[in-house]
Image (tube, coloured by chain):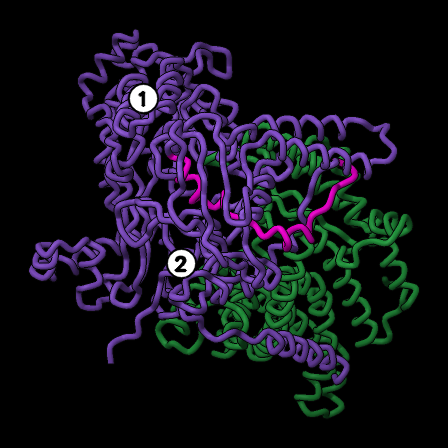
Chain colours: A purple, B green
Amino acid sequence: MPRVLAPIVLLIVAVVASVWSDRPLPRADLVIVERAEVNTVDPHQASWNQDLRVARALFEGLLAEDTTSADQRLLPAVARAMPEVSSDGRVYTFLLRPGLKWSDGSPLTARDFVYAWRRGMLPETAADYSNMFMHIRGAELFAARRAEALAKFAADPAATDRSSRAEELWREALADFEANVGVRAVDDLTLRVELDSPLPHFPSFVAFPALFPLCEASLSRYESLDPRTGRRVWSNAWARPGVLVGNGPYRLTLWRFKRDMRLERNEHYRDASLPRSPTLSILNIADANSMVLAFRTGAVDWTTDVAVPYRAEMLDRRREFWNEQAARVAELSRNGLSPAAIASALPPDPRNTIHAFPSFGTSFLNLNCSPLLPNGRPNPLADAKVRRALAMALNKREITEQIRRIGEPAAGSLVPPGSLAGYTPPAGLPYDPERARRELAEAGYPGGAGFPPMEFLFRRDGGQDLLAQAIARQWERKLGIRVLLLQVESRVFGERLKSAKYMVSTASWFGDYGDATTFLDISLSGSNNNDRKYQNPRYDELLARAAGLADPAERAAALSEAERMLVETDLPLIPLFHFVQVYLFDPTRLEGLSEHPRQIHTLARLKRREPAP
Amino acid sequence: MIAMVLRRLAVLPIVLLAIYTLTLALAWAAPGNPLDRPEGRRPPRAVIEAMQKQYNLDSFPRFYVSYLESASGVRWVRDRLAGPVDPGRPVFDLGPSLQYEDRRVNEILADSLPVSMTLGASAILLATFIGVGAGVIGALRPGSWAGGVSLALAMVGISLPSFVTGAVLILIFGVWLGWLPVGGWGTLGQLVLPAVTLSLPFAAYIARLTRMGMIEQLSSDHVRAARAKGLPEHTVVLRHALGNAMLPVVSYLGPATAYAMTGSFVVERVFRVPGLGEHFVNSVLNKDLFLLMGAALTFSVMLVLFNLAVDVLYRWIDPRISDDRA
């Protein structure tokens, strides 16, 4: 018997030792939950919301979005003031604040921007937002030449001394950048940027993480040349807790994969009043139930998403609470308070912890505009009349009220109304089944007769099945078209969209920067994201014309006209609804959450208020 | 015995190579491009092509050979012979993760495997105690209430999926009673609920094995002889019957421990345990080839090693078992 017990005792000791060695940290001043793990802290790779939020906490750009008010201004951040722009709108001069420091105490200069932006343009970095750099003079050619040189190098098997040849190519690229790309550190505190053509929303790019600075002295220790491919590579060790050098209000002190991330105050940050919570912990909770439970037990101050099955019911209960408080709500709103401000002025109540904010994203349907279907037969959707009929046959309010049930506004346009100062999106097509049937008949399919069965592609996750079924039913009932629902894995979905192997599909788009082009560029003939294969030279021309207009009002009118083509005449896509972002937090406890219409939040401004004694 | 261990270890690379080839071929054939975003913005075409080239995702033979070289340590050895290598570079390099851009598969495994192993070891310990206890009681008192409870436990453990048992346990002990944390990792308290949840199916199976073994042993000749000798009942049961009835349990414990220690997708998700389990599922959905291969190879190595450990344990517990049964 002791022989049997020995391994058991050994196992117990091992378990206890392992748990003991992994002592938990004390609760941070502020705890937030992200449903998806932070993928990267590298501003050049960040593209998901959670990544961008962290990038904005660890780094800071020349300019920053003002998240303290709803009027969507940009504020100078690393820059001392808003940039000086030349009269032709092509040259921006940024003056940096003097005495700025990186989190390791070393000085931050304009050269750190040049270094970071060059890295962002290099084809080997494969930055998700490399497009944002391509408006800078010479950037596109620089990237193309470098890509070509690398391709040639990789294809040449004979080269013997690859290391020194790679070194030579790199020196050539550096010289090319120096000579031809319009980014220059005039001195330590002056950065001059030259664009190919005027781009009124360039400052909005500058406030985006892809254009944040990187500490050259720190990163250059982790870069090397790969002799096999000739590429410049950065070992990801630079982005480790304790190693990563940033210039944001926080520094990264701990990052345990799939578990949590801990940020602490950066003592060298330029504004001593930030961050308002000295330590911040970001938990990763993927499970829908666990996320809500963690919030209910009080372990968490803010969850940035709520799982679909919980949303509608929790929002219903909140509405119930607001109805009970109707008199107080009416009084507060007479005083001019925003809904968010009213929420925090109401007495604490567990029902009042779910909040839905309008976000900068739209759900829509892709309609494949190519003349032929993948099976070689003619595509009925190539006719704009058919696409308009499909759009007008949809009762979007029924979808948002009965399927989504979380108060998302039905969408007529791609750009959410009110999300951009100075831009009014078109109204879009109305719900009009009568006109829809007429258009369909004119296209040669009276009552749906002769219309081939229509494939409707959607993803496995994200609760899209109910949505797809509801839409299919409406089309079948109102237009007499037969719809085949086709549900696929996410990766397969992406591939089929890209190669246009579908007729109709679900889709969504979230804007990146404060300009309508962030939604409109995806329908340009040459865009990577033009999954609809929509080609209309007039549309491309309108956008090109808008880009050349210096007057903001004229430009907005031109962009609005282009959007009208998308949502009223050509319909390569059918807007369904504008997303809302659903959060959990106690409005009487959490302060500093932004009311920015694009849901940009500054983590450094969040603070948990202790309950009144 | 040493010869047996060496023989098994010598076969390990061949087993791994077969698993590697088969898994990679299947993963490669699955549709979808790992570098593509399912929805949302796409990087420029040139960027995708450059990344495909960098990771050898454009050619199966090239990927097969290159990954094999770096994962098996051949590349490290070759570079080491050619000159000094970076001291931080791992010998067995399982590559980068395509999904989590800042992480290498080695780092992901180094973070999550110890967690899964701790949880798995606790679950197996619990399962052994609960299972053997329930099995013995079930065999000794078939009609009694204790026997009924042990049978019910076995039924629940086998038939209820862990996302149900886990949620019920959270609801009772985490939310209603407030005794234990609802999730997370790092304290003994946080270990209890996931370990219990994970242990139930194993406990149920062990209970069945023990019960069947005990019933068979209790009616065997040597137990009758022991009773006839006038030995006290507990000596008969513990020494003469249970000792032999445990042998099938011990052989089940090998693969069971490997399964439990490489993590469970469901239990880890429900209790927010940052273990290895979820990578088995998510790496396939994301087509994260490197992570998928890393997880599959880790699991294979553990499966082989734990089976080996069980065989060693077998001989240690019962020295009469000879090598030629290996």
Q: Residues within 10 Å of mark 1 (few under 14, many from 20)?
A: many
At label 1, which amino acid type do we have?
Ala
Percent of width and height locating residue B97:
63, 47
Q: Quadrant of residue B141?
A: bottom right
Q: Which residue is mark 1?
A: A562
Q: For residue A217: magenta? A: yes
Report in which chain the residue with disc 1 lies: A
> Please, is residue A58 above or below residue A588 in the view?
above
Q: Please state the extent of the stretch shown in magenta in the rendering.
A: A201-229
Q: From the viewer's perspective, is B18 left or right of B144?
A: right
Percent of width and height locating residue B225:
76, 84
Examine the rendering and report whether any part of residue B158 can be seen: no
> Please, is residue B230 above or below residue B82 in the view?
below
Q: From the viewer's perspective, is B5 left or right of A402?
A: right
Mark 2 element type: helix
Whichever of callouts 1 and 2 sits on the residue coming sooner in the sequence is: 1
Q: Nearer the viewer, residue A214 or A401?
A: A214
Q: From the viewer's perspective, is A361 left or right of B11?
A: left
Q: Residue at x 45, y 43 (%)?
A: A94
Examine the rendering and report whether any part of residue B175 can be seen: yes
Q: Which residue is mark 2?
A: A603
At label 2, which amino acid type do we have?
Leu
Q: Residues within 10 Å of mark 2 (few under 14, many from 20)?
A: many
Between marks 1 and 2, how big is the CA–CA gap?
Answer: 36 Å
